[in-house]
């Protein structure tokens, strides 16, 4: 019984620790250097004229991510020229999710004619660092004198099926407010989507 209680306590502690990982609004997000579908490595700093970034952790295979591809494209076309480009990062381990290999990413980007960077993070280094838990999961960053400050975390909007013209466009509203020099009125929402397909730990 004591062993069972200790095991349960350890599980609860792990859950609590995992729940606290990742960035919160106001934190400074680290840059990354990841391979884009065009074969070149891309960092946030690669966007020299950026005022900030719409970083979205996503994938090829999640139905929710697929449902938002056109809206990500629209966000990039709407805001890249204004200083807030979309930077997409594939979160999934390509072994656990064969539809998320680098080659499949290239196919998807070509098929959908993505105008934004689509990067691979096969070892989940930045997926974990940022604290992404679902696909898609968005982090709107504002470039400041201190670094890239997290201004918004969560969902793109509250309408997965794109059926409600009155939907709350969280990312769009956040970026519009940042461009006006204001803080977003909504800084955090719940990301709704598929769970990330994590790399299996190899037992030693």
Image: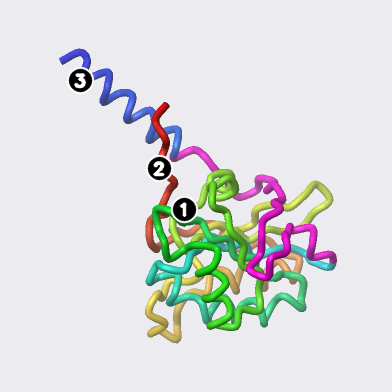
Image quadrant occupied by the C terminus:
top left
* Quarter assignment of residue 202: top left
- Residue 6 image position (x, y, % from top left): 27, 18
Identified at 40% across, 67% down, the residue is 62
Precedes in sequence: disc 3 or disc 2: 3
Image marks 1 and 2: residues in contact by CB distance under 8 Å: yes
- Circle 1 Cα neighbour tier, 10 Å, few/some/many (<14 / 14–19 / ≥20): many
1 and 3 marks in contact (CB < 8 Å): no
The disc at residue 18 is none
Q: Secondary structure at mark 2?
A: loop
Q: Position of residue 71 (x, y in %)?
A: 53, 79
Front-most of residues 91 and 165: 91
Q: Quadrant of the N terminus?
A: top left
Name the residue nearer the viewer: 39 or 179: 39
Residue occupying image coordinates x 60% and y 72%: 173
Q: Which residue is mark 2?
A: 200
Residue 7, placed above or below residue 46: above
Query: What coloring was used for the rendering?
Result: rainbow
User: Which segment did they paint magenta?
Assistant: 19-48
Side of 180 relative to 15 (left or right): right
Residue at the left extreme, as displayed: 1
Question: Please, is residue 29 above or below residue 153 in the view?
Answer: above
Residue hosting label 1: 93
Residue 25 spot, x, y in % from top left: 60, 50
Q: Are marks 3 and 2 in contact (CB under 8 Å)?
A: no
Q: Quadrant of residue 3?
A: top left
């Amino acid at each position: 019984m004591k062993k069972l209680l200790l095991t349960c306590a350890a599980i609860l502690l792990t859950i609590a620790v995992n729940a606290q990982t990742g960035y919160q609004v106001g934190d400074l997000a680290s840059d990354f250097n990841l391979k884009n579908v065009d074969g070149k490595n891309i960092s946030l700093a690669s966007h020299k004229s950026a005022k900030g970034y719409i970083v979205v952790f996503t994938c090829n295979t999640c139905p929710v991510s697929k449902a938002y591809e056109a809206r990500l494209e629209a966000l990039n076309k709407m805001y890249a020229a204004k200083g807030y480009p979309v930077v997409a990062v594939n979160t999934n381990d390509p072994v656990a999710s064969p539809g998320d290999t680098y080659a499949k990413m290239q196919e998807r980007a070509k098929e959908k004619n993505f105008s934004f960077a689509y990067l691979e993070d096969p070892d989940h280094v930045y997926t974990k660092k940022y604290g992404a838990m679902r696909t898609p999961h968005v982090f709107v960053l504002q470039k400041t004198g201190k670094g890239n400050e997290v201004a918004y975390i969560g969902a793109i909007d509250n309408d997965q099926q794109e059926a409600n013209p009155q939907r709350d466009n969280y990312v769009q509203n956040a970026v519009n407010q940042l461009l006006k020099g204001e803080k977003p009125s909504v800084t955090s929402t719940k990301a709704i989507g598929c769970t990330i397909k994590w790399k299996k730990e190899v037992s030693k």
